[in-house]
Image (spheres, helix red, strand yellow):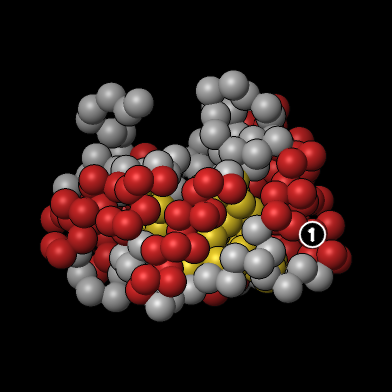
Amino acid sequence: MYIKNNIDKIYERVNSIISKKGLSLDDITIVAVTKTVDVDRINEAISYGISDIGENKVQEIQCKYEKIVPNTKWHMIGHLQSNKVKYIIDKVHLIHSLDRVSLAKEIQKRAEEHDICVDTLVQVNIAEEDSKFGLRKEEVIPFIETIKDFNRIRVKGLMTIAPYVENPEEVRFVFRDLKNMFEDIKEFKFSNVDMKYLSMGMTNDFEVALEEGANMIRIGTGIFGKRTYKED
Ligand SMILES: *Cc1c(COP(=O)(O)O)cnc(C)c1O
């Protein structure tokens, strides 16, 4: 019941924020972050209504893919090396970490091979942390223009990872900045862009992110508990 209780609590907390905005749970995608979590626990979460799962390593997706309930939507939320695109291109529902032209080229090439279109989010490093991947704010629009003829790539929104802070109020500006950028880019009406998803907020800060307009949140610890081995 541990996982079910956690999921119920997350739904409750999400709902209490978004109901004030006149939104319902249908308007929000909760991506259960399953890195380091074994397949039995992932499938258990799916049995309680989780439909979207997020991984940050290609290898983990490959290892788990066949063992997870079919029709689950896989999200690639971690840094993606170009030479690994080929392993996941036909498995993932959404890539959250598009952050450079060389990666876009590789996605375009592999998508052509599979005759598919790939949905992506552009990752933005709002707080300009050296340790984080993602484009700087001022690079985002030029980047989207550069990839506009990549006909196999659709930009469906933006993603950011806020710096970890104890008090999430301190990173409210990150979410606000990304939301503003999200709205600005909509106005440009780029042909390859359909600004639909704003992926921001994790266990520690999702409530602030939702208040600032997130419609996709990525929750690991809040659903599965503390991860047992070190992340990189
Ligand atoms: C690990 C991870 C999360 C989830 O973090 P929690 O704090 O466990 O909720 C969300 N997004 C990304 C990109 C991650 O790597």
Query: In x, y percent, where is residue 51?
Result: 36, 68
Asked if residue 152 is positioned above or below residue 40 in the image, the reply reads below
Q: How many marks?
A: 1
Quarter holding the C terminus is top left
* Residue at screen point 23% across, 30% down: 228
Quarter holding the N terminus is bottom left
Query: In x, y percent, where is residue 139?
Result: 74, 41
- Residue behind label 1 places its C-beta within 8 angstroms of ligand 1: no
> Pointer 1: what residue?
185
* Residue at screen point 70% across, 36% down: 136
**Type of amino acid under label 1:** Ile
Looking at the rendering, which quadrant does residue 42 occupy? bottom left
Q: Nearer the viewer, residue 33 or 105?
A: 105
- Residue at disc 1, secondary structure: helix
Looking at the rendering, which quadrant does residue 17 occupy? bottom right
Query: In x, y percent, where is residue 13?
Result: 53, 53
Asked if residue 40 is positioned above or below residue 162 in the image, the reply reads below
Q: Nearer the viewer, residue 3 or 86?
A: 86
Asked if residue 232 is positioned above or below residue 6 in the image, the reply reads above
Q: Residues within 10 Å of mark 1 (few under 14, many from 20)?
A: some
Q: Nearer the viewer, residue 129 or 154?
A: 154
Camera sees residue 13? no
Asked if residue 202 is positioned above or below residue 10 in the image, the reply reads above
For residue 214, side relative to residue 112 (left or right): right
* Residue at screen point 49% across, 63% down: 108
For residue 112, side relative to residue 232 (left or right): right
* Residue at screen point 70% across, 43% down: 175
Q: Nearer the viewer, residue 225 or 115?
A: 115
